[in-house]
Image (cartoon, rainbow, N blue to C red):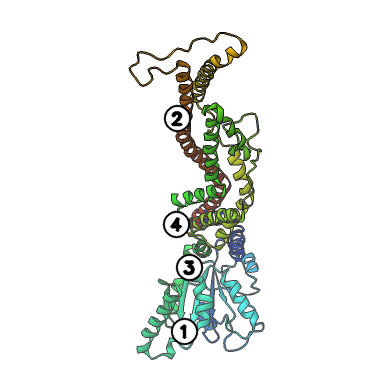
Amino acid sequence: MSEQTVDAMLGALSEAAELGAGRVPAAELEAVRRIAASAGERRALSSEHTVVGFFGATGSGKSSLINALAGEAVARTHVRRPTTSEPLAAVWNARGASALLDWLQVSDRRIMDRPFVAGQELSLIVLDLPDFDSVALEHRVIAERLAGQVDVLVWVVDPQKYADAVIHRDFIAPLATHAAVTAAVLNQVDRLPAGEVGAVVGSLRALLRRDGLDDVLVLPVSATTGAGIDDLRGVIARFAGERKAASQRLAADIHGVAGRLEAAGVPGKVRGTDVQALDRGLAAAANVDAVAQAVASSYRKRAGQVTGWPLTAWLLRLAPDPLRRLHLAYGRDRSRDAEVHRSSMPPMSAAQRAQAGMAVRAYAESAAAGLGEGWSAAIHEHAADALESLPSELDRAVSRTDLGARGSWWWPLLAALQWLALIVAVICGIWLLLPLVLPLWGMVAPAIPQVEGTATWLDGWPVPLVGLLGGVLLGIVLGLLGAIVGGAVGSARRARARRRLRKEVGRVARTHVVLPIEGERERAREFAVAVARAAGRKR
């Protein structure tokens, strides 16, 4: 794997860590920081040397293997070292290795004179590490630390302990992503009957597959007889010769952490029905239907006041206007600041708040689908913040909506006809009274003409009486007509007001609920993309 590729993966991992701050577990972010720090430190040291660590349980024969590989007694066997808590390093081509060994915190060093492989000049460090199942806790701590630092991991097991749960559960399985820089050695095969070696090797391979190491190399070896030592030496020489192990190890570290970060999930798609449900819930909480009904009632009332029979229409003025009672304008009132204006609608009841809460939380649940606990908590936090501001924002949304409850063009026309009919009725009524009143004052009363020549039941009726009755009847008919038309137009205005109110409530929902949550989801998407790139995949 090239340095550029690893750099890109490391950059993507750092980007993911930045995006995931406060959203993914702190332990995972700490792992990212450790890898970034380790990568920088390792790259600042010798790139020529390949560090191979031999890990194993007590009695697995790590020291004997290193001695066999080196061709001399580098590590002491069967007796305690002077300081058993310290690893030992066998170094080939020591130039430039000192700083690297200091970083590894390995002070016990053996500089090798003879080449690791005849005819090849390899820059190599082989570490003999303390037993990780030792009763001394510090031995395990050292083994765990160096398992995270070496370039190549060699797991050494013996026929008696190769299935030990400690090595598989605590060491091999957590580093399963490092198969490219891992080898497994079944040592002491000389203690097995020749016919059983293959079966034990197969059993070890099966355990490694269960740990996640499907293609890891398994070598049967005997440090005592020398069987398989050349094969193991060849594997290590190949790692050292290619000089890719350090980059491969770093890539494996990044891949491992990225795999854990993928547990944060990827946001799913929010359905249109979820947004519609949010809008409906907030519209109900904002009393949209009640306001729309007030628009219709106000329109009918004012239409009746203007177009009703003048002798009775004034009674409608005694009833309060439903819109004025809510302190809402009939239409767009540009003389006031609609953004800060509040209506006189009663505060949200507990039921309305619960309705808004259910709508917002249901949307948050849908938006958080597919995401881990941290991202889900962040989305629900945005939802909680929105619920704090929604009552006042919904009230302002209602106040600034053009309700479209203004008067209609036909009101003046009908009103003029009403007054004309009333004037005719009044004049004709006075005309009828003149023959009765004028003689009392000694005046001559005018003659009352009659209707003639119509060939209808009106023939013979006094003209003033016909005018009086006609004016009154016309006023009543016009009033009924105005009420019918006003009711129909009021219903249309109610539907239009409802649409406008819901549209305005929808804007509030998008501004205060959808957009903040979608911003969080977009951050989660960017995080998932960065994690995928860190893992070496495209999303």
Q: Amino acid at mark 2?
A: Leu
Q: Do labels 3 and 4 touch, CB within 8 Å?
A: no
Q: Pick whichever of labels 4 and 2 is earlier in the sequence.
A: 2
Residue 45 percent coordinates (x, y): 61, 61
In screen coordinates, is 115 left or right of 190?
A: right
Residue at mark 1: 163
Within-10-Å neighbours for mark 1: few <14, some 14–19, many 20+:
some
Q: Amino acid at mark 4?
A: Arg
Q: Quote the CA–CA distance across marks 4 and 2.
A: 73 Å
Q: Quote the CA–CA distance across marks 1 and 4.
A: 33 Å
Q: Give whichever of 79, 209 is nearer the camera.
A: 209
Q: Give whichever of 245, 241 is nearer the camera.
A: 245
The disc at residue 177 is: 3
Q: Give whichever of 308, 54 is nearer the camera.
A: 308
The disc at residue 481 is: 2
Q: Quote the CA–CA distance across marks 3 and 1.
A: 20 Å
Residue at mark 4: 537
Disc 1 on helix, strand or loop? Answer: loop
Q: Quote the CA–CA distance across marks 3 and 4.
A: 14 Å
